[in-house]
Amino acid sequence: MSLNRTKTKGFGLFDIVIAGLSGAIGFEIFVLLNYAYFHLAGPDMLTALALGGVINFLIMLSYCELATAMPKVGGEYTYIKTAYGGYISFIFGCFRWLSSIFAAALAAVAFVLQLSYLFSAFSPQIQNGILAQSWVISIILVVAMGLFEVRGVRQVGSIVVIAFILLFLGFIVGGFIQGVGPLDFSGAQLPTGVSGVFAAVVYVFPMFIGTRAIVAAASESKRPEKDISRGLIISALVIIPIYVLLAFVAIGTVSSAETLEQIPLLSFAAGRVFGSYGSIIFSFAGMAACLSALGTSLSVQSSISRGMSRDGYFPKLLLSVHSKYGTFHVAAIVGTAFILILSTLGAVPFLGYAACFGSLLVFAVVNLSLIRLRQKKPYMDRPFKTPLYPVTPVLGIILSVALLFVPILIGDGNAIDALTSSVGLTGIVLVSYYLRMAGRYRTQIALGGIGVGVGVCLAVFSVFNLLHFIPSYVQFFVSVVFIVTGFFNLSAGKKKDKLEKSRRPEDL
Amino acid sequence: MRARITVRLVFASVQSFIAFSALVLALLLNFNLFGIQSLFDIPDRAIAFYVTMLVVFGVTFLISGFFLVYEWWEKL
């Protein structure tokens, strides 16, 4: 959830803690419990939740030091840039951007699930219709939220956060009054064994990582040297019992034998605790959280892409301001287009892991940045020092990387698919960086060379009919087109490159 | 001069169209829409290879074609 303040007085400790809880209490709790409980850990999901919270707390200790030392706009991007320079910060800025895009797509998919569950109470036909057309609803939702982003519509998050905390507390107290069933912690019930518990940590981890939203508020804090570190620690600790108790009550109301994969676990459990009104209230709460998260992710991706555009890594076009609404409409539209494509996938575990992938990589590098800055800038002003250095940041690095690979080691299909996609996207990020650095005309020369090479190969293939499923005359035609355009690109690029080189000394 | 610019534009447009078609074909192959995998008689284990190749070449030649179209646009 987002915390948007228009006042310029600055944040106090309460505002900072609310900002952290606002980032952490989101739609994830409404959708990510299912996969971890039914497929990976069973009742030991509670251990996974507690472990996820502790790992998040350890990482936030490193954030405390960096955020109080550099309470500037940019958060992780600024820390990594200070420690390692432009190239590494560009790559991890891209990961942070991708993570926001995946999180927004996940929010859109989660909204559809909550909506379908809301209708299950009084019209199963509508519920089935929603599930069948989920991708259409996701598209409509993402386009609508994208338009809100272009028009600059904002909502206040602090009241919503407090309402959520009260709702969750009511659910926990109600569950205990009703007497939730005893939990079986024996390993026999685990769907994927003990390693499944560690894999479950990855899927529940996105519930905690939102506490880092505080670093975005660091530049607006009244006393960043004290309040940022306190806020990060308080919110990272407070969120652990809230989520563990919520999950305890939720899984206490259902057994893992019940097939609830398509039903949000929390909303279902609310129905058992409060009656049918509970399901409806929690479905609405889930939808509100999804909308809020979608809006926040759109803003975050826009902010990151503009930051990198300002530094010359992304096209300057992303910095364009809408003449009527005064918003960064191009950055919003580009992000919306990516979210639109991903949200049509509709796969919650895939999107959950993909959103976590970028964040975990960024966490690992933020911890590395802390170690590097301690060596590179030992006299830097550090109002907060990470305790037990270097054990804490080293543990942060090891745990972040380990969390990434545990689901893959146990052969979790969603994690493998998401990792493959993430590696592909990483490739695109690296290629785009080199293209950007090489400049337009050199890229044109390179593409021209590739065109001529591929064209010649295709011509040879057509003569010997090596690609049997494509008629040889088609192959020959394509080869001629590639060779000719290849030469055009080569000649245009070389001419312009020479012109640019001859101008350069005068410009200097 | 004008004829040369027109020829460049025509070739660039044709190349962009071919590249775009390659990307569409990759999509059809990946999701086996209209039973295209059996139509081209491509074995299952080779699908990933063909899709990757089509995407890589599709994107490369789409950008290459757009560069030439952009040059023409600049000269307008």
Image (tube, coloured by chain):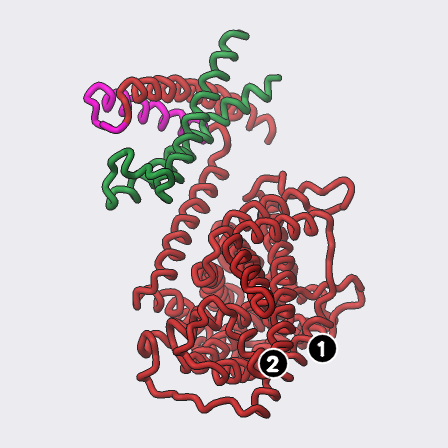
Is residue A434 left or right of A76 when viewed as pictured? left
Which of the 4 quarters of the picture holds residue B48? Answer: top left
Seen at 45% across and 65% down, the residue is A364
Chain for disc number 1: A
In the image, residue B23 sits, relative to residue A164, either above or below, namely: above
**Where's residue A409, x and y in %?**
30, 66
Q: Secondary structure at mark 2?
A: loop
Q: Where is the N terminus of chain A found, in terms of image quarters?
A: bottom right
Q: Which residues are magenta?
A: A442-469
**Where's residue A35, x and y in %?**
43, 69
Density class for disc 1 (Cα within 10 Å; few <14, some 14-19, many ≥20) is few
Amino acid type at circle 2 is Gly
Disc on res. A303? none
Question: Mark 1 or 2 closer to N-term?
Answer: 1
Q: Where is the C terminus of chain A found, in terms of image quarters?
A: top right
Residue A80 showing in the rendered view: no
Q: Which residue is mark 1?
A: A14
Say which chain is green: B
Density class for disc 2 (Cα within 10 Å; few <14, some 14-19, many ≥20) is few
Amino acid type at circle 1 is Phe
Depth order, front residue of A352/B40: B40
In the image, residue A309 sits, relative to residue A49, either above or below, namely: above
Q: Which residue is mark 2?
A: A275
Magenta-colored stretch includes residue A74: no
Chain for disc number 2: A
Depth order, front residue of A363/A201: A201
- Which color is chain A depicted in? red
